């Protein structure tokens, strides 16, 4: 069983919809949680970073961590066609970037 | 400011051939990383470097070697390529090793081993 599970999609929603992307994990030691966005044929870019449980908001994006359920979510409000990309969740028990475990990514498509 | 660049963008090798992938960054970052990305597997760390002249093993180091002779460059070598090394390879750099300091990724190298 993988340490981090992520539905590969693809997920297709109309423009303006609220998108919910999720990951589950098995290692209760994970403390640092990240979401990356990866456009086709490009490298990933860090979108959101959260430490421990709770919510974090940045513009149209909200990251949510529920450590009791070992479940993290990324919400995108007022989705735009430019949000079409693959979204990778990532997490680590330590603050070191050399210990990050990445999910396999969910491919998202926003229909105009 | 080019950020992180990778050379080449694409490569096809035959089993047993060798090659070197070059990563260059112009942000004066101390930390550099090599990842591979395979379908359904996510990004996996191959090797990383915490500064010029240093290297360390990541999660999947077997079959790869690296060198960091200059601060701005991080080389990934395949001495004897195998079909299992068919993947997309990403280089990244960061100013510190803390996860909250963003890793900047290059555009990737698509490698096929026949």
Image: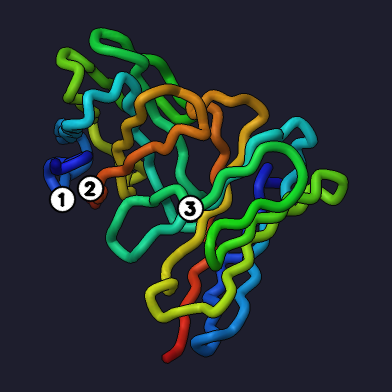
**Both on one chain, marks 1 and 2?**
yes
Q: What is the number of the mark on residue A47? A: 3
What separation in Å lies between label 1 and label 2 (alpha carbons)?
Answer: 4 Å
Q: Residue furthest right?
A: A68
Picture quadrant where residue B92 is located: top left
Query: What secondary structure is marked by label 2?
Result: strand
- Name the residue at 40% across, 80% down: A81
Q: What is the number of the mark on residue B109? A: 2
x and y percentages locating residue B40 in the rendered image? 52, 57
Above or below B87: residue A100: above
x and y percentages locating residue A1 in the rendered image? 71, 46
What separation in Å lies between label 1 and label 3 (alpha carbons)?
Answer: 25 Å
- Mark 3 falls within which chain? A
- Mark 1 falls within which chain? B
Q: Nearer the viewer, mark 2 or mark 3?
A: 3
Label 3: few (<14), some (14–19) or many (≥20) C-alpha neighbours in 10 Å: some
Rendered image coloring scheme: rainbow
x and y percentages locating residue A105 in the rendered image? 52, 59
- Mark 2 falls within which chain? B
Label 1: few (<14), some (14–19) or many (≥20) C-alpha neighbours in 10 Å: some
Query: What secondary structure is marked by label 3?
Result: strand
Sequence order check: which comes first, mark 1 or mark 2?
1
- Name the residue at 15% across, 35% down: B17
Q: Which residue is mark 1?
A: B9
Query: What secondary structure is marked by label 1?
Result: loop
């Amino acid at each position: 069983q993988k340490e981090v599970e992520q539905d590969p999609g693809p997920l297709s929603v109309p423009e303006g919809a609220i998108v919910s992307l999720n990951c589950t994990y098995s290692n209760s030691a994970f403390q640092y949680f990240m979401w990356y966005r990866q456009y086709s044929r490009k490298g990933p870019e860090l979108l959101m970073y959260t430490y421990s449980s709770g919510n974090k908001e940045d513009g149209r994006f909200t990251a949510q961590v529920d450590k009791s359920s070992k479940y993290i979510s990324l919400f995108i409000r007022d989705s735009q066609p430019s949000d079409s990309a693959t979204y990778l969740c990532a997490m680590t028990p330590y603050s070191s970037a050399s210990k990050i475990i990445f999910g396999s990514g969910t491919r998202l498509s926003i229909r105009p | 400011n080019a950020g992180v660049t990778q050379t080449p963008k694409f490569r096809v090798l035959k089993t047993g051939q060798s090659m070197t992938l070059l990563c260059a960054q112009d942000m004066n970052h101390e930390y550099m990383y090599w990842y591979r990305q395979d379908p359904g597997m996510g990004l996996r760390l191959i090797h990383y470097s915490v500064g010029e002249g240093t290297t360390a093993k990541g999660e999947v180091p077997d079959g790869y070697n690296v060198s960091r002779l200059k601060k701005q460059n991080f080389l990934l070598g395949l001495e004897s390529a195998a079909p299992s090394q068919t993947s997309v390879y990403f280089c990244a750099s960061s100013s510190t090793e803390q996860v909250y300091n963003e890793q900047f990724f290059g555009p990737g190298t698509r490698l096929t081993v026949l």
